[in-house]
Amino acid sequence: MKNILFSLCLLLFASCTRDVVLVLPPVPPRLVLNASVSPDTDVTAFLSKSWFVLDTVTDDGVEEGDIKVFINDRLQGRMQPVSDSRFTGRYVLPGCRVKSGDHLRLEAGAEGFQPVRGETVIPDTVEVLSVDTVRFTRFGYGEYPSMRLYIRFRDQPDRRNYYRLIIEKLTEYRKGDRVITCSSMYRSDPDYRDWLSVVYEDPVFRLTVTNPVIEQLDGTTCRGTFTDDMFNGEAYTLRSSFWPVDNSFKGDSVTTTVHYDVRLVAISEEYYRYLVIIRNFSISLGDAYLDGLVEPTTTYTNVEDGFGIIGGCQLAHRRFTMPFGDKEPSWNPFSVYD
């Protein structure tokens, strides 16, 4: 009897699986043109190519491309590849900078690809009136030193404006003449790490919901994007918080200096629409990832005949350098190599 039941179980499980051959016709690659352009730097862009889902891609940068820069329909020149870049496909037009209200257009081509083009309008500067901070303790699984920001700024009237709030923690570790900088946003080395949790508390961050599944989480997953729909043409005080908050530290062998960089960025409509879409791609609640609950979304692009995003931005920046305290940092990057 046991043998019969065992055989039936094997038959049952065997009937639940089958091999399915997927026939996916290859899709020819297209050019991908990305640029986030600000008056603070020369016009820079990244030119790469798309790839098929089954391709093995180690480097998608396009090195021998041709990118022309137009400002207000006037040709400014052809961009040059950046030879010392860590990423292939980076281009720059030295000495070429945009201003508020400029209409920027990039036209790119490369051998074997269909030409592409994208354009945007550079937004106005952000008039920051004041930045105030309050330190407090956040309670959860433990006690976390935190900081709340109150950023008051004036919105330009007679148009819909788009913004993004970015908060970055930078920690400088100094030992003798050696300095290692760790960022909460970018990892320059696999062994260098830092982290920061940003909570977008203000109601304006919850007005850009595109999917009801993430409505309750929108305040922390919207990548800091918002519009002026609640305060068009008026002064407004924006509220956000972050944790943990660490002081700088001066030790016998290593000195750490902690900075918190707050950036309120005016962004173009195209850049805003792109950020609103990609926030749906990585959503978590504690240790649970909710990406599978989100409906499939087409990535926004404003590049004709290709992919990518051409966006403009204006940056208002404030830096807070923390005073020296008596708490030694829990991690030391020099210990990785020393």
Image (cartoon, helix red, strand yellow):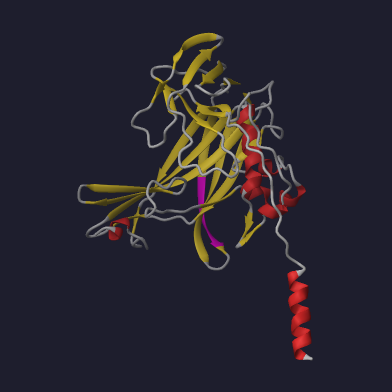
Would residue 189 be found to the left or right of residue 118 on screen?
left
Q: Residue at x 37, y 33 (%)?
A: 85
Examine the image and state in which quarter residue 59 appears.
top left
Q: Position of residue 87 (x, y in %)?
A: 41, 36
Tell which residue pokes out farthest to the bottom in this image: 1
Q: Position of residue 312 (x, y in %)?
A: 55, 26
User: Is residue 75 highlighted in magenta?
Assistant: no
Q: Nearer the viewer, residue 27 or 120?
A: 27
Q: Residue furthest left?
A: 176
Q: Is residue 287 visible?
A: yes
Is residue 222 depicted above or below 250 in this figure? above
Q: Is residue 338 left or right of residue 1?
A: left
Q: Name the residue: 74% across, 72% down.
A: 13
Q: Is residue 17 above or below residue 167?
A: below
| Residue 41 visible from this viewpoint | no
Q: Considering the image in quadrants, where does the C terminus appear?
A: bottom left
Which of 316 and 275 lies nearest the eye of the viewer? 275
Q: Is residue 328 above or below residue 7?
A: above
Q: Which residues are magenta?
A: 133-138
Say if the magenta span includes residue 134: yes
Q: Position of residue 235 (x, y in %)?
A: 62, 31
Q: Position of residue 25 (x, y in %)?
A: 66, 39
Image quarter in which the N terminus is found: bottom right
Nearer the observer, 110 or 120 = 110
